[in-house]
Structure formats: C-alpha cells, structure tokens
Image (tube, rainbow, N blue to C red):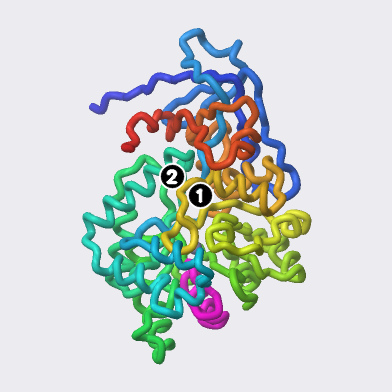
Amino acid sequence: MLARVTVAAVYVSCDRIVTCAPGALPRRRDFDLGILEGAAMRIENGRVSWIGSREEAPDESVYLQGTIVPGLVDAHTHPVYAGSRLHEFALRAKGATYQEIHAAGGGIHSTVRATRAASYEELLARTERVLARMLRHGTTTLEAKSGYGLDEATEIRDLQLLGDVASPMRIVRTYLGAHAMPPDFADRREEFVKTLIEQTLPRIARERLADACDVFCEDGAFTLDESRRILAAARAHGLDVKAHAEEFAYLGGARMAASLGARSVDHLLSLPEHDFAALAESGTVAVLLPGTTLFLGKERYAPARGLIDAGVPVAIATDFNAGSCMTESLPMAMSLAVLKMKMTPEEALIGATVNASHALGVSDVCGSLEVGKAADFLVLEVDDPREWLYHFGVNLVREVWIAGRRVSDDIPC
Ligand SMILES: [Zn+2]
C-alpha cells in the first residue's frame, strides 16, 4: 500500500509582494504590478496556495527582508555554444559591423565550427555555467535555442543536451536549425531547406526534443518564402512557432509568422508602423531585445512605444549569445528597455514576467504570483520594484526560489 505523502505548507512573509497578477492574458494596456504591502504567501507542493497580508500568516512564517517579485522569464536565449567571439567585440570597437564580420567568416559560422567540434561534456558544463549566471540575475524560466550546429546530428545533440542540463530552471527548448545557411550549402539552399523540413524537423517533433521552432528570416539568412515553409512545417508537426524578424532589413517575416499563429516575433527593429495592427490583431507577442542594439554599437532600437500604443503585447528578453549580445542579465535588458526604448519600468517588468510567459506558452505555470501557479520568485534588496531597473547593471537579487525551494544557495559561483 502506498503511503500518502503530505508536504507541509511553508509560509513566507516579506515587506511587499509584487504579484504581477493577473497573468492569464498578455498585458497590452494595463501594466499594474499588483503590489501588496506587508504580504505573505503560502507554498504547498511547489505552488502558491494562498497570498494575503502578513497579519494573517502564522507566526512561524519565514520572513524574507525586501521585495518579492515573480521569477523572471527570459524568452529569447542562445546558451548552447562553444568558442569565443571576444575578438569581434574588439573589432567592432574599431568600426567593423556585424554583417562585415559575418561576411569575413566570423560571426555565426565561427561559433558553428567550435560548437560542432566541442565534446558533449564540455558543452554541457559551459551551458550549465551560463544558466547559473542567468539564475543569479533572477531568471527562473528561459527559452533556449539550438542553432549552432545547423546539421541534423549537432542540432539534435544540442537539444538533447538542453534536456540533460542540471539546473532547477524551467527550460523551454526551441529548434533553430534555420539560424544560418552553412557555407557548404551556399549553392544548394533548396537542399538544406528541404532536408530541414522533410527530415530533421519531423524527427525533432517525433522525439519531442523541442517545444518550438524558430527561423532567422533576414537578408543573408533565410528568405521570407523559405522561412514560411519551415514554420508552416513546424506547425504541421505540432510545434509552436516564432521568428527572428526585421532585425536588420524589413522582409515581412513578423507578419508572416503572426499569420501562422506564432507565439512571438523577435527583434523587430525594422518593423514599419503599418504592420503593428496585424501583430496586435494576431495576439503574437513582440519580444524586444535592446541588449543586442547596445552590444552591436547601434543606435536603432525596436519601436517599443509604437507597438505598445498599437496594443501589441511586448516582452523583453536578453538574446544572450556569444556574438551579438553577451549578457545573462535580464534586469540589464529591462533597464535598457526603459533607458533606450522609453518603456516605463512597469512595462519592462510585465514584459519580463507575464508577457514573456505568454511568448513561451507557460503562462499557466509562471510569470505572475497567483494561487495555483509555481512559487518561482526572487527577493530583491529594494523598497520599490522600479528601483531594480533604475539601479542599472547591478545585481540586486538577494534570493532565488523555484517551485517553493530556495535555489540561490546552491548556485555555483
Ligand atoms: Zn536570437
């Protein structure tokens, strides 16, 4: 006979809880943070089972000094890679552009070569270190893309690796086999796209190696038509779809992906105003990545204000990757959203919690602190959540809890 295991409830209390509730729908116009002063929370089986005032909580509740916010959701990252692109960082300081570095054999292809050559153990250890740094800065859920293998064997290895990572974080896996055209397929584009659609994608879906499929729809990467075929095939195989779109040039990728029911379209620096309404109508989340503009030394940021004013749900993510945005800090990207894209701190915070959870299809689990959702939260050393972004580039995360367990004590430094 099975013994019934009852897990005792744990109460935590603090100076205030920023619930970011309600999180059932992506936020478009209402960015109220749901702040409860002198609040407490009951946690059972890793989930929030009650939220109320501190006076109502039992005396033995654990007092956490500071402000509790939901664990952050990073909706766009490329954490599985080998090699270093440090030299490009220095080259850009001398004036080289991302596209010039790419054309000279650097860029994505240098990371692809290093990633293909790396051992599974080396890559796994590197990825775990990246995730640990993200966690220390407050990310508890992340979307992680493959995309530095390009060939089937390496892409599948890297998606499997993301399933093997030793981390308490929630990981949503995305297949990005269409990240770049491998140089040896430059004259055989159709062969590459066909293999991806007819062979690799069905296998990834069948073996449940990914939750979503992404494509880099851009001049020098994949055309609008190639991108559409890849995403349509992914949908047909039951995967969520999303796209890197309108980062450098406007190809219409965001509209195309939205018409296929994409959960998100990402970057959007070159998205013209006449496409805003189509995005607002589709409900697709615009994932904006201001760290990338900063890191590439450019001036043009995504049109966050226009998108929000048009009613498009906006999320903020890091775009962590070795080439164009080397930061694991989502709060840094949120500060940039305020400083460079003129979002309010409230919009940035909702963008990295509720709206990001919708971009990943995990809004029933995380993104806000509400009864029934996971007890994923951070304790910040601030009195006002806006102070977190105001104090830019400095880590104010005191504790990280995932599924009701304090995990910040276990993070290796
Ligand atoms: Zn990306």
Q: Are marks 1 and 2 in contact (CB under 8 Å)?
A: yes
- Which amino acid does the dot numbered 1 rest on? Asp
Quarter of image, res 88: bottom left
Observer-side mark, 1 or 2, equals 2
In this view of the protein, can residue 203 be seen by the observer? no
Quadrant of the image occupied by residue 183 = bottom left
* Image point (68%, 69%), residue name: 271
Q: Which residue is mark 1?
A: 74
Residue 311 part of the magenta segment: no
**Does dot 2 land on a helix, a strand or a loop?**
helix
The residues colored magenta run 214-235
Q: Nearer the viewer, residue 243 or 197?
A: 243
Q: Secondary structure at mark 1?
A: strand
> Who's the residue at 43% across and 61% down the image?
174
Name the residue carrying label 2. Answer: 134
Quarter of the rendering occupied by the C terminus: top left
Quarter of the image where one finds residue 364: top right
